[in-house]
């Protein structure tokens, strides 16, 4: 097992130093990620929500009635009617 120690890195966007903790390093390794983060948490979050070229469009949610419990819920896709649609609670219950 590799022993991880906190590392001090410099953000490529704002130039501030940030800590890449031993726990974060272990998580990166467990996911097979080989590169260290290049941005601090603030710059990563800002980049995610910015309207710049690298950001995603906001998720559009659609109102539906759960096929199991009948509650009104929202889903991130357009239901076609060809398959049942469930609320989060019923969906997670069906996967157990």
Image (spheres, grey):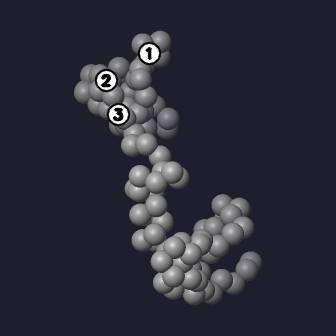
Q: Is residue 64 above or below residue 59?
A: above
Secondary structure under tag 2 reads strand
Q: CA distance from mark 2 to mark 3?
A: 10 Å
Q: Residue at x 31, y 23 (%)?
A: 64
Secondary structure under tag 1 reads loop
Q: Position of residue 37 (x, y in %)?
A: 60, 71
Q: Position of residue 5 (x, y in %)?
A: 62, 87
* Number of the label disc, if any, that sits on residue 62: none
Q: Residue at x 42, y 13 (%)?
A: 81
Q: Is residue 63 above or below residue 2?
A: above
Q: Work out whether residue 11 or residue 82 is closer to the camera in this orientation and state it.
A: 11
Q: In the visual, does 10 lie left or right of 55? A: right
- Residue reaching furthest top? 82
Task: Say which residue label 1 marks.
Answer: 80
Task: Say which residue label 2 marks.
Answer: 64
User: How many residues crowd mark 3 within 10 Å: few (<14), some (14–19), many (20+)?
Assistant: few
Give the quadrant of residue 20.
Answer: bottom right
Q: CA distance from mark 2 to mark 1?
A: 11 Å
Quarter of the image containing the N terminus? bottom right
Task: Say which residue label 3 marks.
Answer: 61
Secondary structure under tag 3 reads loop
Q: Is residue 18 visible in the rendered structure shown here? A: no
Q: Work out whether residue 38 or residue 26 is closer to the camera in this orientation and state it.
A: 38
Q: Residue at x 56, y 75 (%)?
A: 12
Q: Work out whether residue 43 or residue 28 is closer to the camera in this orientation and state it.
A: 43
Q: Residue at x 48, y 77 (%)?
A: 14
Q: Earlier in the sequence, mark 1 or mark 3?
A: 3
Q: Is residue 89 above or below residue 85?
A: below
Q: Depth-wise, is mark 2 or mark 3 nearer the camera?
A: 3
């Amino acid at each position: 097992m590799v022993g991880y120690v906190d590392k001090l890195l410099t953000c490529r966007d704002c130039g501030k130093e940030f800590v890449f903790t031993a726990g974060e390093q272990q998580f990166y390794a467990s996911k097979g990620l080989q590169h260290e983060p290049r941005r601090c948490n603030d710059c990563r979050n800002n980049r995610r929500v910015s309207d710049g070229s690298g950001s995603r469009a906001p998720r559009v949610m659609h109102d539906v009635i759960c096929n199991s419990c009948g509650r009104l819920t929202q889903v991130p896709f357009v239901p076609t009617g060809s398959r049942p649609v469930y609320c989060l609670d019923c969906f997670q219950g069906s996967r157990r």
